[in-house]
Amino acid sequence: MSAVDHKLSKAEEKAIVDQAEKAVDEMLKARHSVARVIFGQEDVVERSLVTILSGGHALLVGLPGLAKTKLVDTLGTVLGLDSQRIQFTPDLMPSDILGSEILQEDEAGKRSFHFVKGPVFTQLLMADEINRASPRTQAALLQSMQEYHVTIAGKPHDLPSPFHVLATQNPLEQEGTYPLPEAQLDRFLMQIDVDYPELEAERRILLETTGDTEAKAESVLTSKRLIELQKLVRRIPVGNSVVDAILELVRSARPGADDSEMNQYISWGPGPRASQALMLTCRARALLDGRLAPSVDDVLALALPVLQHRMQLSFAARAERITVHDVIGSVMKRIG
C-alpha cells in the first residue's frame, strides 16, 4: 500500500473491497454488453472504459470505417449517459459547440438575452473527426474539457456531471485535417489507436451486421452509479512499486533525462499531468480486470496510450524514421 493510503483503517479497507467486488461484476456486464455490438477491438474497448472510469477524455485515432463512432454511441447506451454528437467540419464555429445568446421578446414586449445551450451540454460528447475543424473551433472545447464549464458573454455555465469527451480523429496524412494544439492534446487522458479488426472479428462483422436484425447494447449503469465508480477508482490503493514505475517511465520520456540514444530524439516530453493520468488509469484498469490494486503490468499496458500524444520528437528522429512508439518502447524496457 502506498504512502497516500497508509491511513486507511481496516473498516475502510473492507468497505473498498466490498465496493470493488460489486463494481467488478457491473463492469463485466458492461464489457459483455459492448461486445454484443463491437466485435474484436478488445484493447480499444478496455481503454475507452478505463478512460471513462478515470473521469477523463479520450482521443480515438484511426481511419474512417473502423466503428469509432459506433463504439462511442454504444458506450453511452451501456453506461447510461445522455449523449450528443458533433460532426466537426471546416466551417464549424465555436458557438455551434458551446451555444449562444439570442435576443427574445416576451408577451409584454420586453426584450432580453436568453442563452441557448449547445451540444456540449451533455454527459458524453462525441466529437467526430475533431481534426477537420479549424484550430479556433477545436480550442472551444478546451475550457469545457478542463474546467467542466463554459463562459458565454462573461457568464459561466456548468456542464452536466459526469462529462466526457470522446473525440475521433483521422490520421493527419488524410487531406483536409488540422493538427490538434498541444494544449488540447494534453487534455485527453489517453490517445487510443484504432486499427483494422482481426480476421475472425471481421468475419463476425460480415455475418452479424448484414442481416435483417442487428444486436443492440443494453444499459448496465446509470450516470449516478458511474460517478460512484469514478470516486471508488480514486480510493483504490497503489503500491510504492507502481508509483516508482510511473515516475521512472514519465521522467525518462523527457529530453535530457539521460544520455541514451533514444532520449536524444525527444524535443519535449510528458509533464506531471501524464503521471497523474497513469496513476488514475492504472487504478481503473485493475478494477476493470477484477483486481483490488494495480501492478507494474498496468503501467506498461497503459504507457503508450497515455504518453504518445504528450511527446514530440526531433527532426532527426523523423529523418531516421524513429517513431514515438519506438521511443516509448525503449523507455518501457527500463521498468519491464
Image: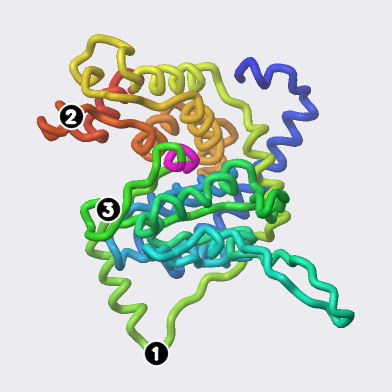
What kind of element bears circle 1? loop
Which kind of residue does numbered mark 1 sit on?
Asp
What kind of element bears circle 2? helix
Q: Which residue is painted at 16% across and 33% down in the image?
A: 318
Relative height, residue 160 to residue 218 (above, below)? above
Q: Which residue is mark 2?
A: 315
What kind of element bears circle 3? loop
Which kind of residue does numbered mark 2 sit on?
Phe
Q: Which residue is mark 1?
A: 212
194 or 92: nearer the viewer: 92
Which kind of residue does numbered mark 3 sit on?
Pro
Q: Which residue is mark 3?
A: 171
Image: magenta residue range? 184-188
What is the distance, in whole Å, between disc 1 and disc 3 at their CAs? 33 Å
Verify CB contact (< 8 Å) between mark 2 and mark 1: no
Closest to the camera, between mark 2 and mark 3, is: 2
Q: Quadrant of the C terminus?
A: top left
- Measured as percent of width and height from the top left, residue 229 is found at 66, 46
Prevailing secondary structure class for the magenta stretch in the rendered image: loop
- Measured as percent of width and height from the top left, residue 257 is found at 33, 13
